[in-house]
Image: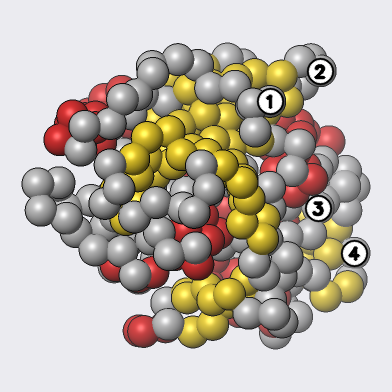
Amino acid sequence: MSEKVVFVNVEEKDAGARLDRWFKRYYPALTHGMLEKMLRCKNVRVNGIKAKSDLRLNAGDEIRIPPLSVEQLENNNKNNLSEADVKFVQSLIIYKDKDIIVLNKPAGLAVQGGTKTTRHIDALSEGLKFGGEKPRLVHRLDKQTSGVLVLARNVKSAALLAKAFESKQARKIYWAIVHGCPKTMNGYIEAPLLKKSGKNGGELMQVDENGQYAKSLYEVIDTNGQFSLLRLMPLTGRTHQLRVHCAHIGCPIVGDEKYGGFFADGLEKQMFLHAKALKIPLLDGKFLKINAIIPNYMKKSFAFLKFSVKNKEEDFDSF
């Protein structure tokens, strides 16, 4: 047990990292909830000042760390992944360079841990070190959403990508099968979203005039009247934005029971939302476009619903 308060100075290599991700790197067994509690109680401070988990660190910043069971944390910092887990998470890779790794995340796999969730991308990413450090999450996908998920392999890349997602310089395209069909074949959905408490303490977003501004673009790829295949681009990054916006126009996503969708006869019991493409800046100033293959259950639904789908690289400017 560390009986004394420890003061640690941020190294140059960690400049630009968020405070919570700094702790995740050096104290991996310290849960996010534990860290948040210490921050609320002012037990963790940066340069003597109360800090929030999303604070961006600078080289030389002094972090106050309260007494912790360091030995226990270090013992928990072992890679306990099985060979099967390592093989599995590496099979999800669709792009890799020295700065980033991009995965095609399957539906049903959470990005981060939580209550009763121990198997998730953040834990599995121990199998993506390839001789370097553990990759960092820089954005999220809902557990039941499949598709493109990018991880940063170093602090500089993490800072660049975090800024790109915050400033909306990064762009994402999703495909969704929805109930019904929008009134127009293309357009936009502009509806503010407010976070409220859902059942069992979960998050529930609602369209509310007091909520945060949210805007999504859409295009109908094909429809049979009863169901439609939509191409969607969120211009803001609110929680569950596309799911709530689709429901708001009377076209909830198939399988999205939380927001009015339901499972349909002849289709698998899945939520039919797939992050199909991503456009992000790289450290060399160029942009990278990545496409994620549609999951098989979604491909099968195209034939069942008689949708005509052109298999081509997504055009981010066509919206």
Q: Amino acid at mark 4?
A: Asn
Q: At which x and y percent is residue 178? A: 35, 51
Above or below, comparing residue 143 to residue 2 in the picture: above
Distance in Å between CA atoms under marks 4 and 1: 44 Å
Can residue 77 be seen by looking at this rendering?
Answer: no
Distance from Cα at disc 4 to Cα at disc 2: 33 Å
Which is in the foreground here, disc 4 or disc 2? 2
Disc 4: which residue: 47
Q: Which residue is mark 2?
A: 285
Find the distance from the CA under tag 2 to the CA under tag 1: 19 Å
Q: Nearer the viewer, residue 237 or 317?
A: 317
What amino acid is found at the position of numbered circle 2 in the picture? Gly
Please report whichever mark, 4 or 2, sits nearer to the chain's N-terminal start. Answer: 4
Of 278 and 229, the residue lying toward us:
229
> Where in the figure is residue 197, as x and y percent of width and height?
49, 84
First in sequence: mark 1 or mark 3? 3
Q: Secondary structure at mark 3?
A: loop
| Front disc: 3 or 2 | 2
Residue assigned mark 3: 56
